[in-house]
């Protein structure tokens, strides 16, 4: 009987040769990592592409908006600017325009006013001050208004002259007066003084007269113009009108007459003219002429000499 020989324990356990544990894991880690990183990078790039495109569009839109805003600002700044080359236009009655100065004088003053940096912009221009300054500089102007253009840069200034009422002749020269008795402008500054068609009154009071200030009380101007109007209506020519010094009288010398008429400035102009016309008619009917004057200063009484 044959007995089998036992193999050693070590021989029965055969070992399969294996690759060292360090080599495969290292190789596998690096290979997988490279694959994963490449895939992840592609995923990241793919995911970031829309964001990049959105950012690019946002930047372009932002740049376009900035450009539009800047363009609007530039247009607005240009639109709000005012030129000092303003247009000057006169409005009012032809009689008032007759004593206006040369238009170039007003134009130069207006351009000077709009030369100020404050008045070169529609937002900061002070139209009220411009109007007041021009009225002070030129007393003959009753009103001044400034019109700003809705489109454009050239403003328009409208000047309205006062209505002349009489010409006052004094030791200081001749002045055009308005209905309030204010001296508007010196006679030597008016090119067509005789064309105004207003009465000339000699002032013997000796008071100084300055343009822009009151030269006569308004009541005197109203009374005088009423007397002149009444006499003209009756075709009575007027040779001269005088305000004597120290009295409240108006002396009117009829045209080509050797006498004058004494009027009371505090009386009723219509009644006094009526009394004079009635006396004149009576004396002419009697073939009598006053040698010196006819006095109608007292109500309901007439004296002549």
Image: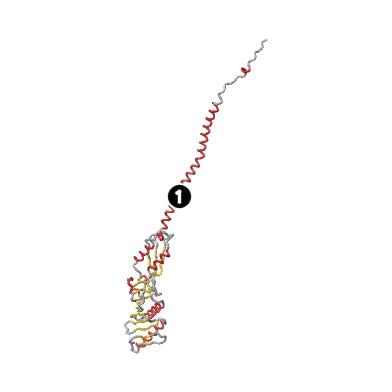
- Which of these two is toward me, 215 or 146? 215
- Which of these two is toward me, 304 or 211? 211
Q: Residues within 10 Å of mark 1 (few under 14, many from 20)?
A: few
Q: Position of residue 88 (x, y in %)?
A: 37, 65
Instruction: Give the colouring mode of the picture.
Output: secondary structure
Tell me the quarter of the image containing the N terminus. top right
Q: Position of residue 14 (x, y in %)?
A: 60, 19
Among all residues in the image, which is located at the extreme bottom? 286
Q: Position of residue 10 (x, y in %)?
A: 62, 18
Tell me the quarter of the image containing the C terminus. bottom left
- Which of these two is toward me, 107 or 212? 212
Q: Name which residue lies at 45% across and 50% down.
A: 66
Q: Position of residue 70 (x, y in %)?
A: 43, 52
Total numbered circles = 1
- Which of these two is toward me, 218 or 78? 218
Among all residues in the image, which is located at the extreme right? 1
Q: Residue 116 occupies which quadrant of the picture?
A: bottom left
Q: Secondary structure at mark 1?
A: helix
Classify 180 as above or below 303.
above
The residue carrying mark 1 is 66
Classify 259 as above or below 172.
below
């Amino acid at each position: 009987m044959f007995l089998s020989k036992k193999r050693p324990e070590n021989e029965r356990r055969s070992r399969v040769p294996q690759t060292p544990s360090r080599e495969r894991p290292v190789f596998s880690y690096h290979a997988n990592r490279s694959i994963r990183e490449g895939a992840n990078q592609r995923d990241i790039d793919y995911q970031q592409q829309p964001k990049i495109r959105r950012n690019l569009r946002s930047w372009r839109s932002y740049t376009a908006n900035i450009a539009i805003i800047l363009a609007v600002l530039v247009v607005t700044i240009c639109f709000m600017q005012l030129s000092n080359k303003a247009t000057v236009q006169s409005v009012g009655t032809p009689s008032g325009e007759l004593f206006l100065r040369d238009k170039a004088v007003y134009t130069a003053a207006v351009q000077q006013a709009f030369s100020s940096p404050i008045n070169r912009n529609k937002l900061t221009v002070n139209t009220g001050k411009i109007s007041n300054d021009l009225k002070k500089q030129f007393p003959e102007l009753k009103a001044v208004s400034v019109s700003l253009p809705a489109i454009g840069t050239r403003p328009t200034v409208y000047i309205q002259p006062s209505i002349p009422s009489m010409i006052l002749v004094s030791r200081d020269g001749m002045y055009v007066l308005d209905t309030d008795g204010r001296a508007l402008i010196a006679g030597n500054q008016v090119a067509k003084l005789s064309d105004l068609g207003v009465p000339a009154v000699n002032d013997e009071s000796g008071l100084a007269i300055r343009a822009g200030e009151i030269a006569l009380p308004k009541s005197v101007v109203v009374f005088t113009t009423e007397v002149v109007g009444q006499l003209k209506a009756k075709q009575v020519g007027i040779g001269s009108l005088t305000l004597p010094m120290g009295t409240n009288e108006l002396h009117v010398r009829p045209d080509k007459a050797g006498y004058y008429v004494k009027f009371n400035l505090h009386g009723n102009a219509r009644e006094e003219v009526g009394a004079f016309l009635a006396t004149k008619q009576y004396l002419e009917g009697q073939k009598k002429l006053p040698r010196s004057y006819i006095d109608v200063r007292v109500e309901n009484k007439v004296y002549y000499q």
